[in-house]
Image (cartoon, rainbow, N blue to C red):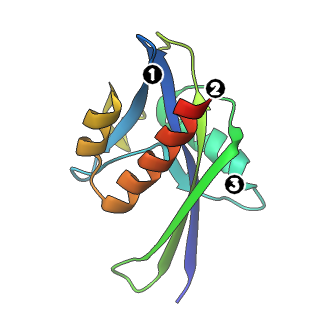
Amino acid sequence: MSTEVASGAVVYQERDGQPAYLLLQSATSDFWGFPKGHVEGQETLVETAKREIKEETQLDVTIDTGFKTATAYALPNGNRKEVTLFVSKVPSGVAVTRQKVEISAVGWFDYATARERLTYDNLKQMLDEANAYILKK
């Protein structure tokens, strides 16, 4: 059994004084989640998060390392996956250009809608934690 390590971020922007969260829909399933991907080579988790967000959305982001949450779970192939998410605030009105091979749709959602749209409970928990952090800022 091997462990796959991935990193990304809860990307958000302020809209009408509230955070709006960027979610991506997988091109190969109905899965909705955050921009993230596998660590390559000797990358740090922050480097991976920045690279994956750029690849999937064309956004150049700054990662807020003051927040970090992680989850781990078993994959159908018997391997284990560990996912770490940071947060990243982007300016309102930025253009998101999806990576067509991997991403079928993108959207900005308020907290309640984002939580409902997320496919898995562990991602909903990560959003809960990120939202609490963002609202305290």
Q: How many marks?
A: 3
- Residue for point 49% across, 28% down: 12
Q: What label sits on residue 60 in the rendered view?
A: 2
Residue at (21% x, 50% y) in the render? 30
Across and down, in percent, residue 8 comes to: 56, 47
Q: Counting other residues with Cα less than 10 Å from the Cα at mark 1, is it few (<14), some (14-19), or many (20 or more)? A: some
Q: State the SS at label 3.
A: helix
Labelled disc at residue 45: 3
Position above or below: 44 against 93: below
Instruction: Give the farthest residue toward the front.
Output: 136
Front residue (pair 47, 127): 127
**Residue 96: image tag:** 1
Judge left or right: residue 17 versus residue 89: left
What residue lies at 46% left-to-right and 9% top-to-bottom?
93
Judge from the rendering whether residue 119 lies leftward or rightward of residue 77; answer left or right: left
Asked which secondary structure carries label 1, the reply is loop
- Mark toward the start of the polypeptide (1 vs 3): 3
- Where residue 92 sits: x, y (%)? 50, 12
